[in-house]
Amino acid sequence: MIFVDSKYIGLISSRLQLFKKVKPDLYNFRCPYCGDSKKHKNKKRGYFYKTKTDFNFKCHNCGVSKSFTYFLKDLDSQLYDQYVLERYREGLTGKASVTPEQISKNLSINQSSRRRSVFPWHLLMIEQGIILSEES
């Protein structure tokens, strides 16, 4: 998920004034909502920062705060559509998005307790050959 977000942050970075990568999961730039300071053109108080599984936007001048998804939707609707489609292809959509590692962990817990997994991605993973066999 972070890879997809980082890719799209890179794609929009040229549209954000004074964009700079501060740390691997922290980006700083002038806020496109308030424009930061009118007197000091070098001030930049807009940030992308990583939470557990996503990036968020926060401006320390005007106080706007939103997920990267909604920030991208405001900035460029066509790029937003591509982003959503790519996240869907990667299986990273929704609030309960689950990674393949979490699915495997869920499957092993369910198999050890002799219950079948009812997680819908489980069938998809078997179909794609990620999980080769299932104990019954």
Image (cartoon, helix red, strand yellow):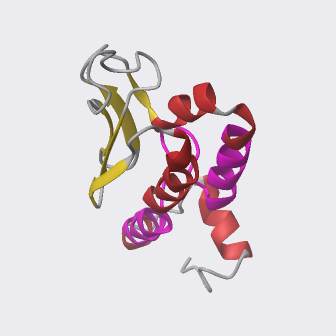
Left or right side of 14 for 128? right
Based on the displayed image, in which of its 4 quarters is residue 121 positioned? bottom right
Left or right side of 68 for 30? left
Task: Please state which of residues 126 and 84 is positioned toward the viewer in this rendering.
Answer: 84
Left or right side of 31 for 82? right
Residue 105 located within the stretch drawn in magenta: yes
Q: Which residues are magenta?
A: 80-109
**From the viewer's perspective, is residue 33 above or below residue 69?**
above
Residue 96 located within the stretch drawn in magenta: yes
Q: Residue at x 61, y 80 (%)?
A: 130
Q: Position of residue 71 (x, y in %)?
A: 51, 30
Q: Position of residue 99 (x, y in %)?
A: 48, 61
Task: Please state which of residues 124 and 10 is positioned toward the viewer in this rendering.
Answer: 10
Q: Residue at x 53, y 36 (%)?
A: 69
Q: Residue at x 62, y 60 (%)?
A: 90
Q: Main secondary structure of the magenta part?
A: helix
On-image quarter of the C terminus: bottom right
**From the viewer's perspective, is residue 10 above or below residue 48?**
below
